[in-house]
Amino acid sequence: MSTTCATGRHDKHDVYAAQCPCRGVLDLLANKWTALAIGVLEEGPQRFGALQRRLEGISPKVLTQTLRRLEDAGFVDRTIYPAVPLHVEYELTELGRGVAEPLGALRSWVERHLDELWEGM
């Protein structure tokens, strides 16, 4: 399904087209660390250390890359508080809160159907 580009930068958006910018957004949102980070951020603003503790198994490098990509795409805001030591918090933007619902549904679906999925693997 394609839609007309509201920004006027393209004739239409078609995620199936090789050169459509939609692919980059889909790539970001389909990443497991993105889906999990957005889930944690639904709980409210979080510091880097809290995110890393909650997202068991993520390296600091991958978490940093994930948060930067989410911030660059407009899903996450980063706020720096001038304190000693420096205090940085991450939180979902309106756009991030909007995508949190479908990603939450996907996470829930995986948890509900994991036993069925493992039977077929």
Image: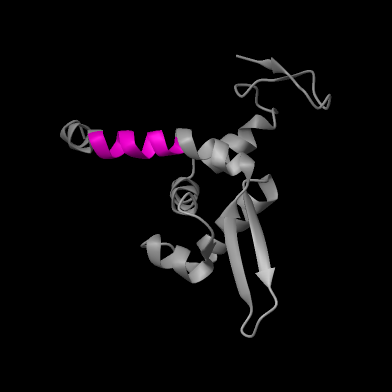
Q: Residue at x 17, y 37 (%)?
A: 115
Question: Which residues are the magenta region?
Answer: 103-112
Q: Quadrant of the C terminus?
A: top left
Q: State whether the magenta stretch is mostly helix, strand or loop.
A: helix
Q: Residue at x 46, y 45 (%)?
A: 35
| Residue 58 x, y percent position in the rendering | 43, 62
Q: Residue 62, relative to residue 98: is it above or below?
A: below
Q: Residue 5, relative to residue 74: is it above or below?
A: above
Left or right: where does residue 112 sit relative to residue 60?
A: left
Left or right: where does residue 8 sit relative to residue 57?
A: right
| Residue 17 x, y percent position in the rendering | 65, 22
Of 12 and 74, which appears nearest the observer? 74
| Residue 43 x, y percent position in the rendering | 45, 53
Left or right: where does residue 53 sit relative to residue 80?
A: left
Q: Residue 108, relative to residue 62: is it above or below?
A: above
Confirm whether the magenta stretch covers residue 109.
Answer: yes
How many marks overall?
0
Res. 50 image quadrant? bottom left
Of 54 and 118, which appears nearest the observer? 54
| Residue 30 x, y percent position in the rendering | 49, 39
Q: Quadrant of the N terminus?
A: top right
